[in-house]
Amino acid sequence: MSDPIRLDKRLVELLGCSRGNAQKYIEGGWVKVDGKMVDLPQFKVSQQKVELHPDATLEPITPVTMLLNLPDPFDVKSPEAGLGLITPESRSEEDHSRIRILNRHFSGLKPTAPLEAKATGLVAFTNDWRVVRRLVEDANRNEQEYVVELNDVVSDAQIEQLNRPMKMAGAPLMRSKVSRQSEARLRFALKAPRPGQIQFMCESVGLSVATMKRIRIGSISMGKLPPGRWRYLPSGKLF
């Protein structure tokens, strides 16, 4: 029995291609070992059957965006909060994107559109510069939607106040759209919220926040994504 060797080296032997192209095929998810996709060039093989998919291409791996339902309770202390929850095992069964999961998808992920402190719900991590530009550089154009549970019964007068222009630390806030969902639940639709803005707005009109959950960023809603699970943003979607 021969000694185990790296998968990329075995592929070079089989195809007569360069080591660099062998690694691209493997990292692109085009190589199977005994019928199972392996995308790690350093994976050791000996007598296993190694196959290259007939549709294999050397095109670069397409950047991806992953949408996570940050579970409750989760105190957001940094923009990276929740990144450790995104693993191959925590992919949601509700993911219908048909994107093949690759190890390379989990490298270089950056947080975008941070949640309000102590909020739960939809967060996005991406290695796609187009998504970063849309959610970070153009944040003022993308509306976010939160459902806010309160410890108080909300009056019509308080909702009217929340929809008026407000200042926080002396600086004007972008106008928000606030509507009632029940006696003690409000919907906030706002752009580029400042840290602590929702809690500040509620306290300014005499309301106490119990919980906050973000359910939408731009045109992308959380849908039926379970807490602690993630799904890919479908190809062609940019919020």
Image: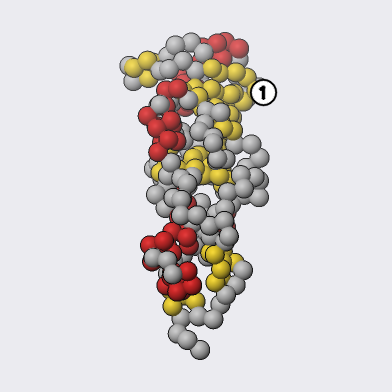
Is disc 1 placed on a helix, strand or loop? strand
Q: Nearer the viewer, residue 122 or 118?
A: 122
Where residue 128 appears, as percent x and y from the top left, is 43, 41
Q: Nearer the viewer, residue 24 or 230?
A: 24
At x 47% / y 86%, what residue is drawn?
A: 2
Residue 147 can be seen, yes or no? yes
At x 49% / y 40%, what residue is drawn?
A: 124
Residue assigned mark 1: 182
At x 60% / y 15%, what residue is drawn?
A: 155
Where residue 87 appears, as percent x and y from the top left, is 52, 55
Where residue 64 appears, as percent x and y from the top left, is 49, 45
| 150 sits to left or right of 196 | right
Relative to residue 229, is residue 17 depicted above or below? below
At x 52% / y 28%, what residue is drawn?
A: 218
Where residue 159 appears, as percent x and y from the top left, is 56, 14
The single residue placed furthest to the front in the displayed view is: 16
